[in-house]
């Protein structure tokens, strides 16, 4: 209700301001002066009419000088956005993976649908985060999608965020997380069409889930209608980099040797990782790292890199550093899984899956022209007339453009999503 009142008050302010601006020192419109006359009648008898008029005109002139139209419109736009978000309903979903692992999951449903209303039913969207992240950093994407009429699901992958972090009976891999996505769709989203949207490693996992669904006999293969990717990663860890075709045998052997040394001395040492988490990783350190990732933020970094964002990374670690260390050790040393290029090569059915790739131009984690050549691979697919199912968009941002520059990045996603029904008909 407070947000509704804010919108009403701001709207009233527009009317009042426009009315006030019509009364200038050179205005002789009787209807405009009637406002002054009414004010004068109510004023003290000890103040002359002329003095009252001068006082009002002086006040209005001052207000005109202070009034900034752009600032006012920005405030009004933000108020409307906040009001829409207040009508969006978000609820957590009780979900257990493999019959024993508790997973944090949520669904956000739109309170106000986009106008004009159409008969086209929009697919649900399932957001898949990247390595070390959680559902929280999808905040701006969830807001943009629900404001446009989409129902949005998001969950913390096993071993991340608020989800369980088992290690004794679990072997972490991109295939495991792809199974989690498939199981979640089957058990929670049921028969509704769904589009997967991932970031970094989450993009690779989403692609794997879509590929697996295409070869599945279950209803899931009919549900996944597309895959959106923000800065797609090459795999679960650096092992996938070694399989880059550009390396010759000597380079590949050198990289393997370096990685093996780092693994044996650091990544396989759970006690060392735990010590680092407990003694070195602090909220201030995480904030510093995040500020570097959000260097091109469209808003003040103090606003975006807030306490809640820092806590979303810090709290899961602080809650159980020993278990987190075990999970990290597995993720960093297990097989990195198939690269996106290998996934496409092994699953020709993906040529029928609509894919939209969005890449932050200034990404320093997975550079657009960096090792692995994932971005170049998707750019080539997008420019190939035989792969009309793939589109590629570059935005002015870094590794998490959907949260760093949400207006442009999420609009790119929305434009693609809104065109899906038409694209699907073309691929039938």
Image (spheres, rainbow, N blue to C red):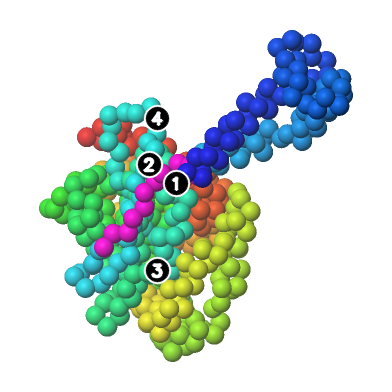
Q: Do the residues under discs 3 and 2 have CB atoms within 8 angstroms?
A: no
Query: Is residue 128 part of the magenta span, yes or no?
Result: no
For the point 75% across and 10% down, which residue is it?
A: 29
**Marks 4 and 3, Cα distance to the nearest angstrom?**
35 Å
Q: Which mark is residue 426?
A: none
Outermost residue toward the left in this view: 217
| Location of residue 147 in the rendering, given as x and y in whole percent from the top left corner | 42, 41
At label 1, counting other C-alpha atoms closer than 10 Å, the crowd grade (few under 14, some 14-19, many 20 or more) is some
According to the picture, the residue beneath numbered tag 4 turns out to be 115
Q: Nearer the viewer, residue 376 or 269?
A: 269
Q: Is residue 173 shown to the viewer in this render?
A: no
**Marks 1 and 2, Cα distance to the nearest angstrom?**
8 Å
For the point 54% across and 78% down, which residue is it?
A: 281
Q: Provide the residue span drawn in magenta.
A: 82-94
Upstream in sequence: badge 1 or badge 2: 1
Instruction: Name the mark nearer the viewer: 3 or 2.
Output: 2
Q: Do the residues under discs 1 and 3 have CB atoms within 8 angstroms?
A: no
Above or below — where is 320 with respect to 99? below
Name the quadrant of the C terminus: top left
According to the picture, the residue beneath numbered tag 2 turns out to be 111
Upstream in sequence: badge 4 or badge 3: 4
Is residue 358 rendered to the left or right of residue 61? left
Is residue 185 rendered to the left or right of residue 320? left
Which of the 4 image quadrants contains residue 306?
A: bottom right
Which of the 4 image quadrants contains residue 177?
A: bottom left
Q: Which mark is residue 86?
A: 1
**Marks 3 and 2, Cα distance to the nearest angstrom?**
27 Å
According to the picture, the residue beneath numbered tag 3 turns out to be 161
For the point 44% across and 55% down, which residue is it?
A: 138
**Marks 4 and 1, Cα distance to the nearest angstrom?**
18 Å
């Amino acid at each position: 209700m407070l947000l509704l009142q804010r919108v009403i008050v701001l709207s009233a302010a527009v009317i009042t301001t426009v009315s006030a601006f019509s009364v200038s020192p050179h205005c002789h419109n009787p209807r405009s002066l009637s406002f002054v006359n009414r004010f004068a009648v109510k004023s003290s008898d000890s103040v002359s009419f002329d003095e009252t008029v001068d006082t009002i005109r002086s006040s209005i002139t001052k207000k005109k000088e202070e009034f900034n139209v752009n600032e006012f419109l920005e405030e009004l736009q933000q108020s409307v956005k906040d009001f829409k978000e207040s009508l969006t309903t978000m609820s957590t979903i009780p979900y257990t993976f493999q019959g024993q692992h508790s997973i944090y999951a949520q669904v956000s449903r739109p309170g106000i649908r986009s106008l004009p209303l159409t008969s086209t039913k929009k697919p649900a969207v399932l957001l898949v985060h990247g390595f070390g992240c959680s559902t929280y950093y999808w905040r701006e994407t969830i807001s943009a999608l629900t404001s446009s009429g989409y129902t949005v699901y998001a969950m913390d992958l096993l071993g991340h965020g608020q989800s369980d972090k088992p290690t004794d009976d679990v072997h972490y891999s991109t295939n495991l997380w792809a199974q989690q996505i498939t199981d979640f769709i089957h058990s929670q989203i049921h028969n509704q069409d769904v589009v997967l949207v991932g970031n970094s490693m989450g993009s690779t996992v989403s692609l794997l889930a879509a590929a697996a669904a295409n070869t599945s006999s279950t209803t899931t293969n009919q549900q996944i209608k597309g895959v959106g990717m923000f800065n797609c990663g090459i795999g679960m860890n650096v092992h996938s980099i070694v399989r880059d075709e550009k390396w010759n045998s000597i380079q590949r052997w050198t990289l393997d040797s370096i990685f093996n040394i780092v693994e044996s001395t650091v990544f396989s040492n759970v006690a060392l990782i735990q010590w680092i988490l407990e003694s070195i990783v602090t909220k201030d350190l995480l904030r510093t790292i995040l500020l570097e990732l959000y260097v091109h933020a469209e808003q003040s970094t103090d606003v975006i890199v807030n306490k809640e964002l820092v806590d979303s990374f810090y709290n899961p670690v602080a809650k159980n550093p020993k278990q987190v260390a075990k999970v990290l050790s597995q993720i960093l040393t297990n097989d990195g899984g198939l690269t996106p290029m290998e996934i496409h090569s092994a699953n020709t059915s993906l040529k029928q899956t609509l894919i939209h790739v969005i890449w932050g131009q200034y990404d320093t984690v997975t550079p657009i022209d960096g090792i692995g050549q994932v971005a170049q691979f998707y750019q080539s697919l997008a420019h190939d007339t035989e792969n009309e199912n793939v589109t590629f968009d570059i935005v002015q941002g870094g590794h998490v453009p959907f949260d760093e520059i949400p207006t442009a990045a999420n609009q790119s996603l929305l434009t693609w999503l809104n065109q899906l029904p038409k694209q699907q008909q073309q691929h039938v």
